Amino acid sequence: MATGFVWHELYMWHNTWNWAQIFPPSLTVQPGEHAENPETKRRFRNLLEVSGLYEQLVQIKPRYATEDEIARFHTREHIAHIKSMSAENGGDASILTPFGKGSFEIAQLSAGGTMEAFDAVITGKVKNAYALVRPPGHHATADVGMGFCLFGNVVIAIMHARAVHKLGKVATVDWDVHHGNGTQSGFYSDPSTLTISLHQDNLFPADSGGLAENGEGAGKGYNLNVPLPPGCGDGAYVAAFERVVIPALYKFKPELIVVPSGFDASGVDPLGRMMVSSEGYRKMTRLLMKAADDLCGGRLVMSHEGGYSSMYVPYCGLAVMEELSGIRTHVEDPWAPLMANWGQMDVQPHQAQLIEQAAKLVGNIN
């Protein structure tokens, strides 16, 4: 069955200014491009085209999410605040999240693109889909944007799918190197949504994503965090999937699996300190696809989040897209031989210890 792909040039027109403009005014920060700039996303899409894979994907046209659809998750005050700043010359949503004129509409298109990917998978137009959207969304909470995120794309799409398609149980598996605090906040007391986040321990947001954050009320047990120590490579990530993520999915039995997909856990990302290779992302995708085949008819959606290495994000993305589509291209990862020789790529004892602690929480899922 076909794999869908969401893309629009306007995603690349979201303006994040530069570092010197978002810190307190001074002459101590040399102007330079913001980390969340278009380059990694554009190069990901371009490598798909060069490889020949792009033309074999089902192109899914995004649409603009309405304010009412966004308001299923976000407060009206937050929506109005972003809209007002965007109509002028932009502003800062909060921590490290500057944006320019017109970014409100682009953020609507980002949320709408993720919703369209959901629609295509749920209705059977495609088996699985990847939404290469921007700005990202997994840090945005109901009343504030943060961490480069304006609106919670995945949360909005899940709420849309429930309202329109009567979708039931959904599982999210966030492999971005930063904690998916926004997605967690959207479903923290909801037992119909299993939220899982694998991330570097206490990287961003500060003091967020610990093992103890396990849901509350009716949702107790349905939020799993795997705060991995810095330096984890393919071995640790695959072990976390095999010992935590996959058992949790089989116990929960979702109707749809969603991945907030960041490639900033890669071994050369400037904003993370992990060592995952493109092959590691390939293996994790393969494990998720097997679970999706067994549990929910293969229904799997990925929505793009972080990833800030312009040289390496494209190869991680291509590996994921090859697995989703079942089409291997002629393109080889040129960095693979180097990364294959790195030390401690296998799961290390202190990493395994943390993973085992997280695995114990799977028992809390009813």
Image (cartoon, grey):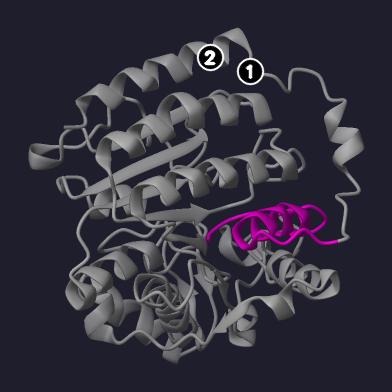
Characterize the local packing of mark 1: few (<14), some (14-19) or many (20 or more) Cα atoms within 10 angstroms.
Answer: some
Give the quarter of the figure containing the N terminus: bottom right
Residue 231 appears in the figure: no
Q: Residue tagged by mark 2?
A: 352
- Image quarter where the C terminus lies is top left
Q: Residue under circle 1?
A: 347
Q: CA distance from mark 2 to mark 1?
A: 6 Å
| Outermost residue to the bottom | 87
Foreground residue among 206 and 210: 210
**Location of residue 307 (image quadrant):** bottom right
Residue 267 inside the magenta-drawn segment:
no
Res 327 quadrant in image: bottom right
Determine if the magenta segment contains residue 319: yes
* Residue 356 image offset from top left, x and y in percent: 43, 15
- Work out whether mark 2 precedes mark 1 in sequence or the reverse, and give the earlier one: 1
Q: Secondary structure at mark 1?
A: loop
Mark count: 2
In the figure, 195 relative to 82: above or below?
A: above
Vertical arrangement, residue 157 with respect to residue 81, above or below: above
Residue type at tag 1: Val
**What residue is at 48 percent from the left and 67 percent from the top?**
127
- Residue depicted at 27% across the width and 32% down the height: 213
**Residue 33, above or below 209:** below
Magenta residues?
304-329
Q: Residue at x 56, y 10 (%)?
A: 350
In the image, residue 80 lies at what x, y percent?
28, 82
Asked whether the beta carbons under mark 2 and mark 1 sit within 8 Å of each other, the answer is yes
